[in-house]
Amino acid sequence: MRISVIGTGYVGTVSAACFAELGHEVVCVDIDRAKINQINSGVPPIYEEGLSELLRKHAGKRLSATSDYDNAVKRTDISFICVGTPSDSSGNIDLSIVKAASASLGEALKKKKDYHVIVVKSTVVPETTEKVVLPIIERHSGKTTKDFGIAMNPEFLREGKAVHDFMHPDKIVVGSLDTKSGDIVASLYSGIECEITRTNPRTAEMIKYANNSFLATKISFSNEIGNICKELGINTYQVMSAVGRDFRIGPHFLNAGAGFGGSCFPKDVKALIGKAKEIGYEPLLLNSVIAVNEGQPLRMVKLLKNKLGNLKGKKVAVLVLAFKNDTDDIRESRSIPVIKELLDNGAKVSAYDPMANENMRKLFGGIEYYKSATDALRGADACLIMTEWDEFKSLDKEFEVMKQNIIIDGRHMLTPKKDIEYVGLCW
Ligand code: UGA
């Protein structure tokens, strides 16, 4: 099949490369010339494990990139919308990029005679495909759903493991208005061994939100239990590891700590809250999931104050800035509210991350960034551990350069050592 992919963020680029690997001919479309040139020369515009190998293998052969919508639509049978859906200032979903991509696709469709399927892969709140994307395409193309197909095919890709997750999914969901377009989308995945769930578009949209909201709920639940455990002197990791053995619960996403960050969970839970409110429903549980998550980083600073008293003039090392391990992505990282709170309290912050120093510098220009954990720890009064990178599990002698050995661990990373005052966030 010939596929065009609109948007070369992490979902678009990974999907394009993986579709090429499955044997399809793929054209990436983006308005950003620099990204197009990178993809055409086999260089990924983002870091994802396994992506550069796939791009090197397929660029210039089954995979190319362009900024020409008309040509991309003309040359392909199916287009995936993979553009960003950020939050607006009140936390609701901002569909402006999806709308712009839909309009451009509609204009391109107007010039094409053959049947074409448009698939929304961007995460959009229920009803968006039918009530926003479809009417825009109809208006700009002058065509109806007799002339083109429309479907929704959500992604469940973890950042950092997106190539693996695409090729080895535990579910594929195809929501379509009619059987013909759904069959075409489903056929793209015939090289992957996985059952395909067929639904209408709004159900597919809701599956994505329910999935992410449930995972976020598991984390906030674990954090709440962890906060209670902390007060009672109980190790919540022992508690949740036993709880996770119940087959109805499962062992994953029960790690208490500094909370969830990233470009997906915070944004998606808030977008679902916004959609629920729009239809007159107050989502009490989802509101609490966000409230618990926002409280966790501040609890770290509170524990620090319990140990150090007034933070004014104290040097605090913040180790690891990305929202999770193995990425340079700092979006909604739990380090952000922590650094802000430390600075508001007059502390001096020294920071280190193996990949994310430069990204964090754009947000906080006035703090010191270092090239190693030891350099960031030198002379510090305390250290906050924010993200679960494997290389930090073995930190030991590095702490000897601190002025005072106080460690607040937000991720249950370290094994407490002699001579170190180790404080777990929830244990
Ligand atoms: C998440 C989902 O896992 C993907 O399935 C989904 O496709 C993606 O969002 C998306 O909507 O595009 P991602 O944001 O890459 O993927 O990150 P996760 O690995 O799920 O971690 C999210 C956050 O939860 C991280 O900050 C992590 O530290 C935190 N977390 C995770 C915990 O605090 N505790 C846990 O037990 C697990």
Image (cartoon, rainbow, N blue to C red):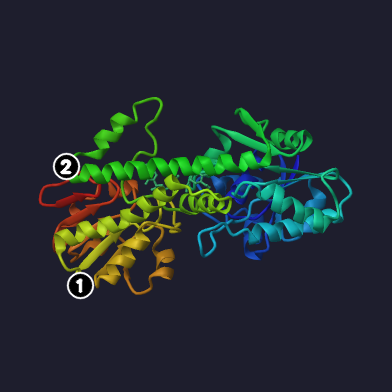
Amino acid identity at mark 1: Lys
Mark 1 Cα-neighbour bin, 10 Å: few <14, some 14–19, many ≥20? some
The quarter of the displayed image where residue 191 is located: top right
The residue most toward the top is: 247
The disc, 1 or 2, on the residue closer to the chain's N-terminal end is: 2
The answer to whether the residues at label 1 and label 2 have Cβ atoms under 8 Å apart is no
Q: Is residue 370 visible?
A: no
Against 208, residue 400 (above or below) is: below
Q: Position of residue 91 (x, y in %)?
A: 50, 59
Q: Which residue is mark 1?
A: 312
Residue at the image point whose x is 42% and y is 45% from the top: 285
Q: Secondary structure at mark 1?
A: loop
| Residue occupied by mark 2 | 233
Q: Is residue 3 above or below residue 352?
A: above
Q: Position of residue 315 (x, y in %)?
A: 21, 68
- Amino acid type assigned to the residue bearing label 2 in the image: Gly
Of tags 1 and 2, the one toward the viewer is: 2
